[in-house]
Image (tube, rainbow, N blue to C red):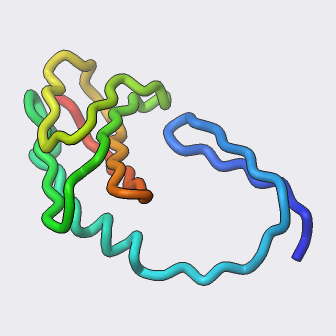
């Protein structure tokens, strides 16, 4: 164990953690969660649909490729993306205490 500073960037959001670093064994839970969420169509023109059968999606946040949050909405299965600029975007889906980030292309 050593005292280390860790900086992580997700969609332009910077989080800095300082403290003891330990070896961690990761389970397949996050991978399974990511595989269980469907976003379609991708690429998308107007309405992005999100499916997750096991529980509700608590929050959906949409980020530009530069990391700027352009939308945050609670308890939804669809987003109207027609008003946003085209190109690569990131969708962060919060389900309980976990967050899954997926890429989408807007046309």
In this view, the residue farthest toward the right is 3
Asked if 58 appears above or below 11 in the picture, the reply is below
Instruction: Using the rendered view, name the quadrant where residue 31 is placed.
Output: bottom left
- Percent position of residue 99, x then y: 41, 54
- Percent position of residue 67, x then y: 49, 31
Identity of the residue drawn at 33% across and 30% down: 72
Identity of the residue drawn at 36% across and 50% down: 94
The number of callouts visible is 0
In this view, the residue farthest toward the top is 83
Identity of the residue drawn at 25% across and 24% down: 86
Choose between 85 and 100: the one closer to the eye.
Answer: 100
Quadrant that contains the C terminus: top left
Quadrant that contains the N terminus: bottom right
- Give the side of residue 9 with respect to residue 49, left or right: right
Identity of the residue drawn at 20% across and 62% down: 55
- Percent position of residue 70, x then y: 36, 23
- Give the side of residue 97 with respect to residue 20, left or right: left
Instruction: Using the rendered view, name the quadrant where residue 104 is placed.
Output: top left
- Give the side of residue 85 with respect to residue 28, left or right: left
- Give the side of residue 31 with respect to residue 9, left or right: left
- Percent position of residue 96, x then y: 36, 57
Choose between 43 and 22: the one closer to the eye.
Answer: 22
């Amino acid at each position: 164990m050593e005292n280390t500073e860790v900086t992580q960037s997700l969609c332009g959001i910077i989080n800095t953690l300082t403290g003891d670093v330990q070896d961690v064994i990761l389970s397949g839970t996050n991978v399974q969660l990511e595989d269980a969420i469907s976003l379609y169509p991708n690429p998308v023109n107007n309405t992005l649909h999100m499916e997750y059968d096991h529980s509700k999606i608590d929050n959906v946040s949409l980020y530009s490729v530069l990391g700027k949050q352009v939308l945050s909405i609670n308890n939804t299965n669809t987003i109207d993306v027609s008003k946003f600029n085209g190109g690569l975007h990131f969708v962060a889906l919060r389900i309980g205490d976990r967050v899954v980030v997926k890429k989408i292309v807007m046309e």
